[in-house]
Amino acid sequence: MKQSTPDRRLWLKNPLAAFTANDLDAGGGVVLAGGLIAEVLAAGQSPATPCEEVFDAGRHVITPGLVNTHHHFYQTLTRAWAPVANAELFPWLKTLYPVWARLTPKDLRLATTAALAELLLSGCTTAADHHYLFPHGLEDAIDIQVEAVRELGMRATLTRGSMSLGEHDGGLPPQSTVQDPDVILADSERLVAAYHERGDDAVIQIALAPCSPFSVTRELMVESAALAEKLDVRLHTHLAETLDEEDFCREKFGLRTVDYLESVGWLTDRTWLGHGIHFDDAEIARLGAAGTGIAHCPSSNMRLASGTARILDLEAAGVPVGLGVDGSASNDASNMIQEARQALYLQRLRYGAGVSVERALGWATRGSARVLGRESLGEIAPGRQADLALFTLDELRFSGSHDPVAALLLCGADRADRVMVGGQWRVVDGRIPGLDLGALIAEHSSAARRLVNG
């Protein structure tokens, strides 16, 4: 595959349509140079200076690279597993924990590669993963994920998750899946030192992510917040996903979820939360005042019957909102363009048909980038990173459609034709160059069967 060299200007010329996630007109295309967007051209405009390369985008709808704010890559190995196909969150987790405790390094490598490949093919260029399982033998889980991200050429926020509150102490997970807090904090510091990159073009970032109120101690939450401030990295956890979690917080800590969050030093703009469904008006206002972000996971929330997040109310209060596909055992896919469609339809059920296609795409791009603290991503504008997704509308599902941008969601796009990260093509003609997808599927499927069968 021929790649553009950093010092050569590439013109993605005259697209069929473009969604920029801002008010810029990109009807004439986008000029890229040095891994950045150099120019955004209105219809009829040409580049200010000649470009060495030109790509005819006349068949393509161009969007910013989609950004996924919440995932559990390892769960691709337990998709559509019959024992939990019809379960809500707590019984779903308790049934799956013993299965996940059998993960091996090879399993995780396959699961991570499968999740990243599926995301990339759906137009996603940046993904956040919440990995909190470190059974014996899997102590280097995040190191394994770093290698997989680099091989596929994506960007990622990899979170050093943790569980320290096992069943013996009133938590949900089995003891075999919990770790000592000192081990967790030491490994968190190691990973930040080894892999965390800063700057607009960062490829790998590390965040700290105790799993949830029902699987970690209050002390670990406090110590993680202090360490994140010391190292200047972000914080992530599940919160307010179900009413069961709300009841747990009341019984265990005597607090509602947002009160608990504030009590452990997490109600800040360093934090983003997975799900964020069950908040009252006052709590939404407090989250907005703090700048705490929300990863909205519509497919998972519907799959587990957890509830519907109040996304428009959260945004109105100043809460940064993005989208996450969540784990592939509660979605059960890793597809960001489909997740934007689900978000559109779920939020229309709550707020009406006035929730626009463009707003939903904005959650998947600029909104998600803001949630992860990556302001250089998620929109098409000069100076932003050249992370782009290009979709074609050649399939039968799009026949008869009129608005190309609306067609992406309303007609159900599920696969990008081309994807670029930092000015480099990572998907070409619907395929990931250098990845034997058939072999990956075969090996991944075999690992999944072994895992669930013990």
Image: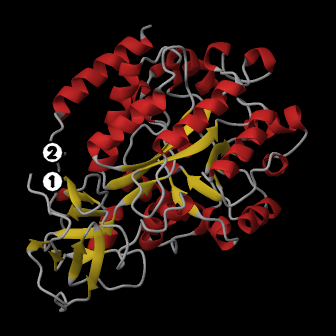
| Drawn side of residue 394 relative to residue 238, left or right | left
Q: Quadrant of residue 218?
A: top right
- Label 1 to label 2, Cα distance in Å? 7 Å
Circle 2: is it few (<14), some (14-19), or many (20+) Cα within 10 Å?
Answer: some
Nearer-the-camera pick, 11 or 403: 11
- Residue positioned 49% across, 47% down in the render: 196
Q: Are marks 1 and 2 in contact (CB under 8 Å)?
A: yes
Closer to the camera in the image, 223 or 402: 223
Asked if residue 130 can be seen in this view, the reply is: no
Relative height, residue 318 to residue 201 (above, below): below
Q: Quadrant location of residue 170? A: top right
**Mark 1, other Cα within 10 Å: few <14 / some 14–19 / many ≥20:** some
Task: Answer with left or right where residue 48 lies relative to residue 360.
Answer: left
Residue 38 image offset from top left, x and y in percent: 28, 78
Residue that lies at the very extreme toward the right in this rendered image: 254
Q: Which mark is residue 452?
A: none
List the residue tagged with mark 2. Answer: 433
SS for callout 1: loop
**Residue at 24%, 77% in the rendered image:** 30
Residue flagged by tag 1: what amino acid is it? Val
Numbered circle sitting on residue 428? 1
Query: How many marks can you see?
Result: 2
Q: Residue at x 55, y 35 (%)?
A: 190
Q: Identify the residue at horizontal 34%, vertical 79% (top origin).
A: 382
Place of residue 12 in the rendered image (x, y in percent of width and height, measured from the top left)? 17, 74
Locate residue 241, reporting x and y percent.
66, 43
The quarter of the rendered structure image containing the C terminus is top left
| Residue type, label 2 | Pro
Asked if residue 120 can be seen in this view, the reply is: yes
Residue 279 against residue 290 in the figure, above or below: above
- x, y (%) of residue 16? 19, 75
